[in-house]
Image (cartoon, rainbow, N blue to C red):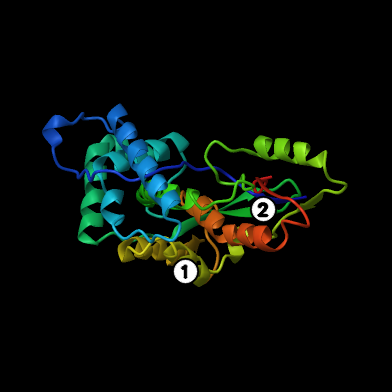
Amino acid sequence: MSSLGRSSCRSAGSRGTRKGMSGRASRSNHPGRPESAANVRRLQRRLCGVAKRQPGRRFHALYDRIFRRDVLEVAWKRVEGNRGSAGVDLQTLVEIRQLGVETFLEGIATELKAGRYRAKAVLRRYIPKSDGRQRPLGIPTVKDRVVQAATKLVLEPIFEADFAPCSFGFRPKRSACDALEVLREQGKQCNHVLDADIRNYFEEIDHDKLLKLVAERVSDRRVLRLVRQWLRAGVMEDGLVEERLSGIPQGGVISPLLANIYLNVLDRVWKRRYAHVARWCAMPTIWS
């Protein structure tokens, strides 16, 4: 039996009718309407259902769903709820509220629809670790966080259908406590427990390999282009932008999902080759 450190959480989902940004007269002036959340949940359930029924399917019509009105509203509420500081453009959540969230989301939808959206570099900050070292944290702009959150709402249910039951990192309604309970139950049948961690995991993820893994389920080139933008946007530190050929920023909204997609290969290999030797349980410990 083995446990592997990785972190955070995410949501599950499916597919639904396309809802654009039009129809302003019939909408509330304040994003975050209850019907938006309900519509997104229906979309996610349908996407996840199709992905489960068709394991080899590649989804090709996803981009238009990312800038749907309801998807952007839910994405904004999640970004707003997480609070967080400004990115390289120095635009804060407070400033966006003052200027008008409706206008902000309309602008994002327009940019995405016209293909003009461009991701900015992430702002490098450091947070202390328990061993005295520092962990690099990448802070995207608020706009990039909203687009990432919207993309995650659409992509996550598709990949959630593929993730192994033994995986507890970055999963909806799963936590480290759930993983520990599984380990406790499995420990009754085992003589040894191995605790392992992947050193510097987020910083070492290969961009090309990750994009190929995303493309196993997504054939929509515009969505793949979005993911590629976030991977290649670079990191700004002390006013200088450094291009990265590997790694994903800890702090990006979509980073936990991408990290789980990448590590899911290990889950699959373990099940295929070593399930008869030991039981595997991946649990979130990366922020410790």
Q: Amino acid at mark 2?
A: Gln
Position of 6 with respect to 72 (left or right) is right
Q: Which residue was labeled with disc 2?
A: 134
| First in sequence: mark 2 vs mark 1 | 2
Q: Nearer the viewer, residue 21 or 185?
A: 185
Q: Label 2: how many residues lie within 10 Å, few (<14), some (14-19) or many (20+)? A: few
Residue in the picture at 70% in, 63% down? 273
Q: Residue 127, relative to residue 27: is it above or below?
A: below
Q: On the rendered image, what quadrant is the C terminus found in?
A: top right
Residue 219 in view: yes
The quarter of the displayed image where residue 70 is located = top left
Q: How many marks?
A: 2
Residue in the picture at 50% in, 65% down? 210
Q: CA distance from mark 2 to mark 1?
A: 31 Å
Which residue is outermost to the right? 191
Q: Position of residue 163 (x, y in %)?
A: 55, 51
Q: Nearer the viewer, residue 247 or 218?
A: 218
Q: Position of residue 76 (x, y in %)?
A: 35, 40
Q: Nearer the viewer, residue 177 or 243?
A: 177
Q: Position of residue 188 (x, y in %)?
A: 83, 38
Position of 193 with respect to 226 (left or right) is right
Question: In the image, which disc is placed on residue 18?
Answer: none
